[in-house]
Image: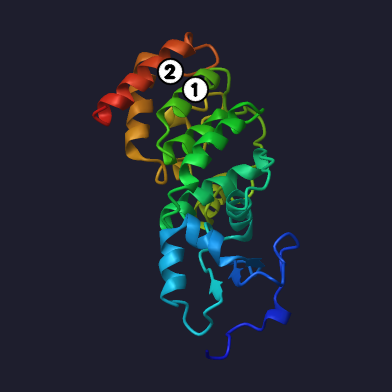
Amino acid sequence: MEQPSKVESDLDFDPTYSDRGADFTLFSSDSVAFKVHKYYLQAHSTVFRDMISNCDLKENHNLLEFTDPQIEHSTTLTIFLNLVYNRQLNLSRDSLGPFRNLIGFAKKYDCRMVLPTLKSLARQFLDQYISPHYVFIIAAELDDIDLASDCIIKGTSWVWPKDSDRPDPPQWRTSDEVAESERESKGESNLGISRGAGVLEVTSGPIWELPRVPISYLVGLMKTGRMYMLTARGGDGVQASQDFKKIMKACQGK
């Protein structure tokens, strides 16, 4: 084996994942190391299984360095490892960003067993005091029509604030989205929110949210918005939710 590119004694280890008896190290894009067991990676990801089996890890066969600043951040890896190690997850508003990024991580590394678990866990966000537009986006990225339709029921009681904005949860936005929102806050752009409008009115939300949302869910929400006012005084959110579900199933041929 060739000389490792990183000296283990110099790494900054996550306190939960620092077992020296573990046989593999993950190194996040923000320079946090995680000592893990290969078995858990191989059992939950076909990509990791192939990489480890084929020793396709460059110089160091027991160290995998991540580079994506969004989906391979230490906050994302923490949730991923807590899931595969079957540790308790305490999800809150601050978990929204890492949770959303884990969806992209799971798809990139073909973690087929993780995605259904994320669908089940995502409902925890809907039961908290969290703007339903966040949960709708997560539901869309998970392709969970039922959860997305339930967000519409809750969404009829939420509007964009008229005075001050509450910052997005940590790690929710990409660096490009952060840059665009800063331009908007300085008056250099008019692509932000429409204050006082419903958070699930597609045209009222910030433009930087749209590219990462699957187009079928955007279309389904727009069509629902043409039939119902998705605002705090919009009327029957339950009926809007049911019709959204019908639209989505028609779009997907179900």
- The residue under the point 44% across, 15% down is 229
Disc with the residue nearer the chain's start (2 vs 1)? 1
Q: Position of residue 70 (x, y in %)?
A: 53, 58
When asked about the image quadrant of residue 108, the answer is bottom left
Kindly identify the amino acid type of the residue bearing the numbered disc 2: Ser
Compared across the picture, whether 221 is left or right of 29 comes to left
* Nearest the eye: 77 or 195: 77
The residue beneath circle 2 is 241
Please tell me whether residue 193 is drawn above or below residue 78 in the rendered image: above
- The residue under the point 47% across, 30% down is 204
Residue 168 at least partly seen: no
The quarter of the picture where the C terminus appears is top left
- The residue under the point 47% across, 82% down is 58
Outermost residue on the top side: it is 235
Task: Determine contact: label 2, label 1, CB under 8 Å.
Answer: yes
* Nearest the eye: 73 or 119: 119
